[in-house]
Image (spheres, grey):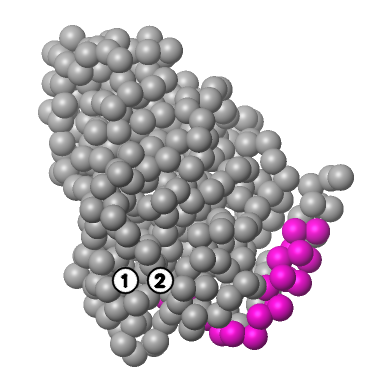
């Protein structure tokens, strides 16, 4: 069966299943569509809406707003969507500080929140909620994969760096959890920082033999290019966010050969992923990123729940979400006790194919990895 046939079959199956329900669901998507992190939110939106379009379910309505990467704007948008637009489900936030500002209040009002990306430790443990589902991961996971793999990459003395916000702190905690070498430098930068001359000087003087960075979006582009120009030359490793499809073209040759922990890759070998990559490229004329893959999976999770239960029946709808009865682009996918995924984690390498920079899987870092904080969740 070729990819086009798989795609047509997937569209037909989803459409048949989801049109079986007549219960409308209104979704409020709050994501970053402007400023330095816009590419992440745009890919989130486009992946989600690709799945919505393929399903062609008239009972699903999506309202999309730009949070401008500002917590106060995200809160205002969430209040409007809940109070005025009467949404049933919220989704789309990329940044963990925005998620912390929005998710607890939304779930306290009985709304479902399906996270396409941000999954901070505070919401994975003591702050868990039955109506909060992290479809992407728990924030630490992709960094755990990098830490577990670092010794294989020859990094025995690591300099580690991330922005000073919730996901940055989760990032370095995740890396250190499974890293077997010595951490010779640990630095938190400003969120949105673009000049890394000072940090590169610290790396040079640290005695490290490798560098781990979590710098998503424009932060990663700035650092990787400045680092390559510096001539320091130590190997770089990070999570997928630091070397993602949405920013690789801007990094160019400076990113080649770097390794990154991921739970998805465009070359992941399963039928759902082949269909997704083909459909996304045909619709948007670019390869999808991890953010697009999470958006796509989140929409298909929602559609699968709609086919089983009315959103007005919260316990039944919650159970339908928990069942995760959809074909994930990651292959096997299940929710753990605290509504975070149990999934395999990989290591990818940045390569160049023709004129295109992309990632290829080079190894499996961890299998069936779940949420490290679920023991603190009492729901």
Q: In this view, does 63 lie above or below 368?
A: below
Residue 235 locus on image (x, y percent): 36, 17
The magenta stretch spans which residues? 9-28
N-term-proximal mark, 1 vs 2:
1
Structural crowding at the residue carrying mark 2, measured as other residues with C-alpha within 10 Å and reported as few (<14), some (14–19) or many (≥20): many
Q: Which residue is drawn at 46% across and 73% down?
A: 315
Q: Which residue is drawn at 18% across and 9% down?
A: 207
Q: Who is closer to the viewer here, 221 or 48? A: 48
Q: Can residue 43 be seen in this view?
A: no
Residue 362 locus on image (x, y percent): 55, 22
Residue 107: mark: 1
Residue 273 left/right relative to 140:
right
Q: To which quarter of the image does residue 18 belong? A: bottom right
Q: In this view, does 220 lie above or below 93?
A: above
Residue 364 locus on image (x, y percent): 53, 25
The answer to whether the residue labelled 1 contacts the one labelled 2, judged by CB atoms less than 8 Å apart, is yes
Residue tagged 2: 112
């Amino acid at each position: 069966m070729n990819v086009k046939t798989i795609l047509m079959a997937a569209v037909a199956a989803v459409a048949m299943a989801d049109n079986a329900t007549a219960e409308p669901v209104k979704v409020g998507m709050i994501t970053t569509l402007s400023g330095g992190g816009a590419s992440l939110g745009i890919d989130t939106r486009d992946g989600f809406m690709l799945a919505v379009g393929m399903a062609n379910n008239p009972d699903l309505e999506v309202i999309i707003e730009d949070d401008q990467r500002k917590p106060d704007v995200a809160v205002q948008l969430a209040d409007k969507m809940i109070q005025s637009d009467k949404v049933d489900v919220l989704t789309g936030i990329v940044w963990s500080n925005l998620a912390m500002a929005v998710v607890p209040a939304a779930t306290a009002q009985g709304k479902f929140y399906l996270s396409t990306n941000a999954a901070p430790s505070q919401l994975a443990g003591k702050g868990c909620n039955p109506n909060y589902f992290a479809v992407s991961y728990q924030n630490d996971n992709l960094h755990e994969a990098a830490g577990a793999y670092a010794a294989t990459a020859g990094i025995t003395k690591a300099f580690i760096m991330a922005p000073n916000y919730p996901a940055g702190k989760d990032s370095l905690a995740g890396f250190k959890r499974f890293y077997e070498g010595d951490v010779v430098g640990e630095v938190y930068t400003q969120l949105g920082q673009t000049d890394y001359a000072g940090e590169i000087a610290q790396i040079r003087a640290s005695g490290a033999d490798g560098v781990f960075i979590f710098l998503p979006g424009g932060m990663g582009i700035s650092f990787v290019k400045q680092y390559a120009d510096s001539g320091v030359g130590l190997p770089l490793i990070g999570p997928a966010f630091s070397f993602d499809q949405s920013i690789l073209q801007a990094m160019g040759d400076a990113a080649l050969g770097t390794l990154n922990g991921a739970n998805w890759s465009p070359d992941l070998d399963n039928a759902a992923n082949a269909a997704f990559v083909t459909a996304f490229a045909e619709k948007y004329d670019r390869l999808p990123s991890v953010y697009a893959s999470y958006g796509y999976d989140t929409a298909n999770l929602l559609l699968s729940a709609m086919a089983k239960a009315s959103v007005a029946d919260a316990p039944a709808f919650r159970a339908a979400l928990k069942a995760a009865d959809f074909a994930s682009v990651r292959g096997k996918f299940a929710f753990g006790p605290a509504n975070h995924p149990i999934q395999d984690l990989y290591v990818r390498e940045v390569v160049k194919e023709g004129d295109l920079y992309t990632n290829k899987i080079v190894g499996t870092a961890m299998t069936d990895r779940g949420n490290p904080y679920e023991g603190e969740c009492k729901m």
